[in-house]
Image (cartoon, helix red, strand yellow):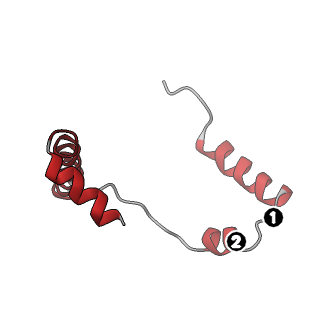
């Protein structure tokens, strides 16, 4: 048995809130549109994860080079000017 409110009471509460607080501006425009959000697929998740992990690895390598390699340290300072 499901706990919580039934579907009818959810619809009633939403309608009651709309009457109390009418939406204005962008919220009104977005409320009229019927946007649907779909979860990303496995392939898309893998692409984003690869990009994030790759950029983190590049940052980590850059930090290690900055701390341990004097010529890279000088390059960063000269490039920043």
Q: Secondary structure at mark 2?
A: helix
36 with respect to 29 (left or right): left
What residue do we see at 85% from left, 56% from top?
20
Distance CA(mark 2)–CA(mark 1): 8 Å
Q: Would you place residue 49 above or below residue 80 in this image?
A: above
How far across and down, in percent of the image, does residue 37 sit?
41, 60
Q: Is residue 48 visible?
A: no
Pointer 2 residue: 28
Decide which of 14, 45 is in the foreground and name it: 45
Q: Tell me, yes or no, whether the two marked residues, 2 and 1, touch with CB atoms within 8 Å.
A: yes
How far across and down, in percent of the image, does residue 61 sit?
16, 45
Task: Give the class, few, some or many, for how many residues have Cα within 10 Å of label 2's Cα (few <14, many ≥20).
Answer: few
Decide which of 56, 64 is in the foreground and name it: 64
Q: Would you place residue 77 above or below residue 27 in this image?
A: above
Q: Secondary structure at mark 1?
A: loop
How far across and down, in percent of the image, does residue 33 sit?
57, 74
What residue do we see at 63% from left, 68% from top?
31
What residue do we see at 61% from left, 71% from top?
30
Q: Would you place residue 79 above or below residue 16 in this image?
A: below
Give residue 22's mark. Answer: 1
Decide which of 14, 29 is in the foreground and name it: 29
- Image quarter in which the C terminus is found: bottom left
How far across and down, in percent of the image, does residue 18 sit?
77, 59
Residue furthest to the right: 20
Give residue 69's mark. Answer: none
């Amino acid at each position: 048995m499901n706990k919580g409110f039934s579907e009818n009471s959810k619809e009633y509460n939403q309608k009651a809130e709309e009457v109390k607080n009418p939406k204005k501006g962008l919220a009104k425009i977005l409320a009229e549109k019927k946007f649907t959000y779909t979860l990303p697929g496995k392939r898309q998740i893998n692409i984003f994860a690869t990009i994030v992990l790759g950029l983190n690895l590049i940052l980590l390598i850059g930090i290690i080079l900055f701390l341990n390699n004097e010529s890279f340290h000088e390059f960063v300072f000269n490039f920043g000017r």
